[in-house]
Each structure stands twice: as C-alpha cells, then as structure tokens.
Image (cartoon, coloured by chain):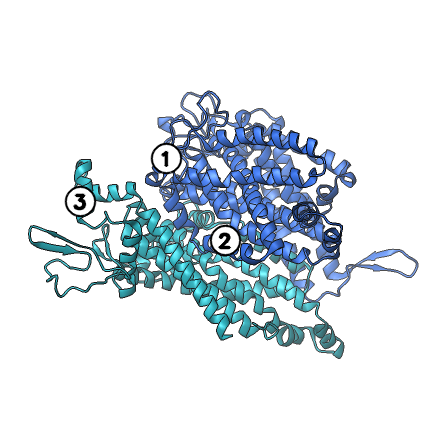
Amino acid sequence: MLTFLLRRLATMVLTALCLTFIVFYLTNLPPNLEKLAKSEAGSRITDTEVESWLEKNGYASPLLVRYGEWLGVVPGWTHEADGVTQGRCIERGQDPETAPRYCGVLQGDWGFSTVFKDDVSSILATRLSLTGILMAWVMIVMVPVSLIIGVMAGMREGSKLDRSLSTFSIASTATPEYVSGVILIAVFATSMGWKVFKGTATSAMDEITFENFFLPVITIALYGIGYIARMTRASMTEVMTAQYIRTARLKGVSFRNVVMKHALRNALIAPFTVIMLQFPWLLNGVVITETLFNYKGFGWTLVSAAGNNDIQLLLGCSVVAVFVVLVTQLISDIGYVILNPRIRIS
Amino acid sequence: MDPLSWTGSLSVLNPIMIGVAALLALSVIAQIILSLFAPEPSVKVNADGTLIARGGMYGSSEKAVRWFFLALVALGLTYVVAGVVMPMGSAGIIGAISKQLTPVWGSLIVLFVLSLRYKRRLGLYGKLFDSSIGMIGFGIVMFWVFTAIFSDFIVTHDVLSQVSGMKNKLPGTPTPNGEGWYLMGGDHLGRDVFSRVIAGSRIVIIIAPFATIFAFMVGITLGLPAGYYGGKLDTGLSFLSNLILAFPVILFFYLLVTPEIVQTGMPQYLGVVLFLFPIIFLMVLVNSRFYVVPARRNVMLLIIGIVGGYFYLSFVGEAGTRVSVLPASLDVIHMPGNMLIVFVSVVFVNSPTVFRIVRGIVLDIKTRDYVAAGQTRGERPWYIMIWEILPNARGPLIVDFCLRIGYTTILLGTLGFFGLGLSPESPDWGSTINAGRKLMTIAQHPAIVPALALMSLVLGLNLLADGLREESLKD
C-alpha cells in the first residue's frame, strides 16, 4: 500500500509539473508577453520599447529559467539600473539586501494580478471560498438525488420505474449546463415563465437565499445527476443478479430488506469512484454556470483572467484546477481500495 | 400581414392535445406507482398454450399509457401533416415550420420505410429497429442530418441580413416588407432565429462526426499497440493521455483558441501532428492485410499516400497562415475562419479518452484463444491488432462513437458559449446561445431555440447509443 501511494504521489507531482509547464509555456508565448507589455506600459509603445520593458521586468531570460523562478526553485531575477535594484522578489521600497532570494509558488508567492490589482493568492482564496459554497450545495443536492434514482432504477431492471428513471438520466446527461441554465432562467426567472427565482446569482456572493442560489445549483447538479445515476444503476443491477442476493431472497428475506441491507452497500462502491472523478467535470460546469449567472467565483475568475491576458492569475487558476483534478483522482483510487476489500494492491 | 399564432387555424385541436397529454402523464405516474406492488410477469402462458395479458389495475394502467401515447403521437402528426398540406401561414408557426421542413419529413419517411422493410439483412443497423429507444434516437439524429443537408431550402431568410424593425421580436412576427414571417422571432440584431438555427445545424453536423472520427483514428492507432505490446510504450502513452485528461477542458480551450496563440501557429502545428494519424492508420491497415501481395500493397499504399497526402496538406494548410504548403489554387478544403482550430482542439481533447477505451478493450481481448491461435499461425502483430482484435472490439466502440459525437457537440457549444473559435456572427448553436443569454430578461427565444436544438441532437445521439448497446448485448 505504501509503495502504491508513493508511486501515485510521484506520478502526481510529475503530472503537475508537466501541466503547469505547459500552461506556463502557452501563457508566456511572445505575442502574450507583447500584449502584456502594451497593456502595462501603454498601447502605443514601439517594438524596441516593448523589448526593453520585457527585459526590465525579467521576461527576457530563457523560458525554463522563468518557469523555475515562478516555481521558486531558481533565484528570482534582479535588475540594476540607475543605482536602483529591482527584482522579482523585491517589493517596492524594500531593501534589496533583505529580500528573499527565492519567491515562487512553492514559497507561497503567487504573483500579482494585472486585472484585479491584487495578490493572486488573496484573489484565489476569496474566489475559491465562494465556489466552495456553490460546490457544497451542488454536492448536497446531486449526490443523494442521483444515488436514489440509480438505486431505484437498478433494483428491478427493466421495470417501468427503471425505464422512466433511465430516460430521465439520459436526458439530463444530454443537457449541458449552458442549455439547462438558459432554459431554467427562461422558465423560472423571466416574464415568459414564472418569476420565482433570480436569473443572476451576483447577490448570492453576499447573502445566499433560496431565490438567488437555487438555479445555479440545480444547473450544475442536473448535468451530473444523470451520469452518477446511470453508474449507480449499472452497479446496482450487477449486485442484484449476484448469488448472495438470490440466496437472501430464497431464505425469505423481504425485497425491501434485501435492497436496504444486502445490496446497497456493495452497490455504492462504484458510484463513489464516479462521484470523485466527477470533480473535474464539475469544474467545467462551475466555469460555465458562474459565467452564466454572473457569480464571481473561481470559474468566473478563470474566464476573466484568460480573457484579459492576466498571466499570473491564469497560472494560479490552472495550478488550483490541476491540483483539484489530481487530488480527487488520488482520493478515488485510495477510497476504492479501502471500500473494496477484493482489490489488493501488490 | 398578421402575426402568426403558434397553431393558427388548428387551435381547435389544442384543448384535446392538452387533455391527452395530461391523461398520459397521469397514467404513467399511476403505472409507476402500481408497478411497485404488481406481480412480475406482464403476460402469462395458459396450459393450453394461449397467452393472457395481465389484468387488474396495473394491466389497465399499462393499456392506458399505450393508447394515450398513440393518441398523442397521432395528434402531433396531425399538426405536422396539416402544416405541410395547408397553405403557408394558415396553420400557425408550427404548421409553417413543418411546411419548411417538408424535404426532411420526406427523407425520414423513405429512410424508415426502407430500413424497416430490409432490417433483417442490415446487421447491427437493422437490429436497431427492434428497439424503440434506439429508433427514436436514430429518428432525431437523422432529422438533424437531413435538416443540415437541406438547410439551403429550409431557411426562410438570409442568415446574416439584419432587419432593423425585427430586433427581439416574438415568434411569428411578419417582416416589414410583407414577404414572410420570422417563424422563431428575431434576435438582438434583427436576424431570423429560425434560419440561424437551421443553418447552425450544418456546422455541427459537419464538424462533430468528423472530429469524432479523427479522434477515433488517433485513439485506435495509439491504443492498439499500447494495449497489445504493453511495457514502456504503454506507460509512456498512458502518462501522456492522463496528462491531457487532467487538464481542465475550458482552460485548454482558452489557452489554445485565443488570437495571440493562433498567431503563433500553435494549433495548426498540433493539427499537423494529429491529422497524420488517419493516414498512418489507413496505411497500416492496408499494409498488414496485403503484406503477402507486395505488388497490390504498393499500389494501394501509393494511392493512399497521394490522395491522403493531398487532402492532408489541403486540410492543415491555408495560404497566408503559418502552415501554407499548397498554393491557394490547389487548396480544395477551405476552412472558414477559425474552424480548423476548433476542429483540432476538439480532436485533441477527445482522443485520450478513446485511447483509454481502446487500450482497455485490447488488454481484455488479447488474452483470448483466437489471438493466441493467430500468434501460433505466425501472424504479424499489426495484422492481429487490426484484423483480429479491432473487429471484435467494434460493439463498445460503436456505442462510444455515438456518445462521443454527442459529447463533441456539447464541446462545440461550449466553445461557442465562451465566444472562442468560430466568428461571432456564425450561426452555430453555441455562439447563438451566448449572444441570446445576455438579453434573457428582454427576449428569451433567441437563446432557447438553439439551446433546445442542441439538447435534442445530443439526446438523440444518447438514445441511439443506448439502443445500440441494448441490441449489441443481445447476441
């Protein structure tokens, strides 16, 4: 188990390094840097001025060195002009002697956002907490509903209940967030349908009410429900045909007890993995839904960072996104091993 | 001209329609509740060999559902048929739309009649017509395919022309020049929503299946050797595919499809690599089969090389961009705007998943006896992979293919929703939803109509996949 864990962790670190390097490379391509220079130093500067600006701000060194600086394993750049030493790790007005040599993601210095004029780490902290609230509500709605649907559909395969619930799950997986969101807003938040909810969730950032938060939560949950329910159903039907269930039925255990006491526990192992692996998908949904409902969380930040060429913030967002994906993968693997005693890691 | 109502002179049917629909909903709910208490078999066999249907409350609810459903379908068909027969405008918006769609209805009827007539000779495709879910899904998918084919005849107005008086007008509003109606209303620039949705179907129907086919070719070409040989190759390729899978899709789109990165030619270089795989796949396919007849093999390889190579160069290259090999006069495939980039990114996102599926199936199949028999006969590895293993993996692959087209459609919509890739005035569904959602409080139809179109296509593909899975599991 320990070697398994260590190997998984090593792969995880390697994957994270590769992915952040790819993002770093793509965001630091010359046209992006040129755009950054123009937006920071004035849009009408000449090409030579762009180059000197880039050199002054440490963008002239080779890509790998810059990646190392950003990561915090290579000393930050320093630049001396007119007797004033500027540097990556030297804050304005700080004495260059007292400044740390390394300042990167590993040291907790995530950079400065050019759009929001704030530290990336503090932006990400507030945004992530907002998205965390949204995700928590999504999970509270999505997991029980999808498990109930899946178990009910799977306990009697081929029954009318199974067919209707399966059709519902197929329909919900066929409805991406931007479709369901638009339809839900039209039906529940405009003059066309009933005006019971609000079409934006901007006010939910201060105070969450049923009125402003129900639609975004339902929009994200709806897309996930179908998928998890189908997985639960598949696992439930498999368990219901197992020998020990037949034995229990033949002993005279009632159908309700067979489902509740014998089948349910084994049938819920597979959906656990699926729910954990749903996180990356939820991330997608979160970005779409937050944009649609104008809820300024992590997804909204990602979109505005990418749209405004905010390199440091975008890098920070991608670190978080990659981290979430990798950690959920790890948890789902470990959880699967713990839940299912039949699997042994050699 | 007067504005059109939804059903026009057929509105006498509306109360009946609503009544039947309500009764159907009631009986379905009743049946579900009753099914929890009902005995198992619905048909019993008597001792003398006759059959008896289940009676009682449950049996009658079953019958009620069937008859109400048939009545509802018949009523729905009445609207459509009456719309086609009656003059334009007298059967309301629904009638006018179904009149515009006449070529689609005709093609659908021909297709279904022929398919049902010869279904026993058509293999898995014919078996699809044994499952009602599969048939419904197939019908919806083919509806959109035919709509895309005939879209030039179906559209009522020019897709890009803006009529100033028609901004955000409701469905059925007549145009100021009195030549017709905006059947689904006008959008925020005064363009016809109905025509745009119809024209948008063509973009989806062309890109989604092709991108999926390309993703499958990449996934199969890499997945077969990874699963078959295993070892270092497998470890390397799996790591690579996990890398791409761990990358949030939207972030990837944002990074790859922004104008700055397009300038560097990055997506085109990616296309240069990805689009090589179909040619490699076809060459390996032919080479493994005709290795023993070198003369024939050489001719076929030459043909694939020349024809495929020409299309390849014409596909990835475009005069005036970073990758321009062929001069404009020889370039047959012109990808408008950023379509190539959209295409490349969708293929790139899909292929790792296909790779994983193929690899998994190969790992399972290679332990079978017929593979061992092939190895004993001295068949070469690529022959075994392509001609022994791949045909036996077709069931799950076909099902996944249908699901993946749906997923690709969703991805295309996502790209459009964020305003990435295709040009803003392009009528594709994602961009139209994006344009419409910003004015949801004023007018809802510009966003809802493309949203429903996209949903119905994906739903059709999912139902089709479900039907195929059911039927392919039967044998």
Tell me what residue is drawn at x 44 percent, y 23 percent.
Answer: B327
Residues at badges 1 and 2 in contact (C-beta under 8 Å)?
no
Q: Residues within 10 Å of mark 3 (few under 14, many from 20)?
A: some
Q: Position of residue B286 (x, y in %)?
A: 66, 37
Name the amino acid type tagged 3. Trp
Name the amino acid type tagged 1. His
Q: Residue under mark 3: which chain is it in? A: A
Q: Are marks 1 and 2 on the same chain?
A: yes
| Side of B61 relative to B183 (left or right) | right
Q: Residues within 10 Å of mark 2 (few under 14, many from 20)?
A: some
Q: Which residue is mark 2?
A: B241
Colour of chain B in the rendered structure image:
blue
Q: Position of residue B38 (x, y in %)?
A: 72, 65
Q: Residue under mark 2: which chain is it in? A: B
Residue B239's label in the rendered image is: none
Along the line of sight, the residue nearer the viewer: B380 or B205: B380
Along the line of sight, the residue nearer the viewer: B144 or A120: A120
Name the amino acid type tagged 2. Ser
User: Cα distance, mark 3 to mark 1?
Assistant: 42 Å
Above or below: residue A192 compared with residue B242: above
| Side of B345 relative to A291 (left or right) | right
Above or below: residue B52 compared with residue B255: below
Tell me what residue is drawn at x 54 percent, y 49 percent.
Answer: A174
Q: Residues within 10 Å of mark 1 (few under 14, many from 20)?
A: many
Q: Is residue B199 visible?
A: no
Q: Are marks 3 and 1 on the same chain?
A: no
**Total marks drawn?**
3
Q: Residue under mark 1: which chain is it in? A: B
Q: Is residue B156 visible?
A: yes
Residue B188's label in the rendered image is: 1
Residue A53's label in the rendered image is: 3
Give the letter of the cyan chain. Answer: A
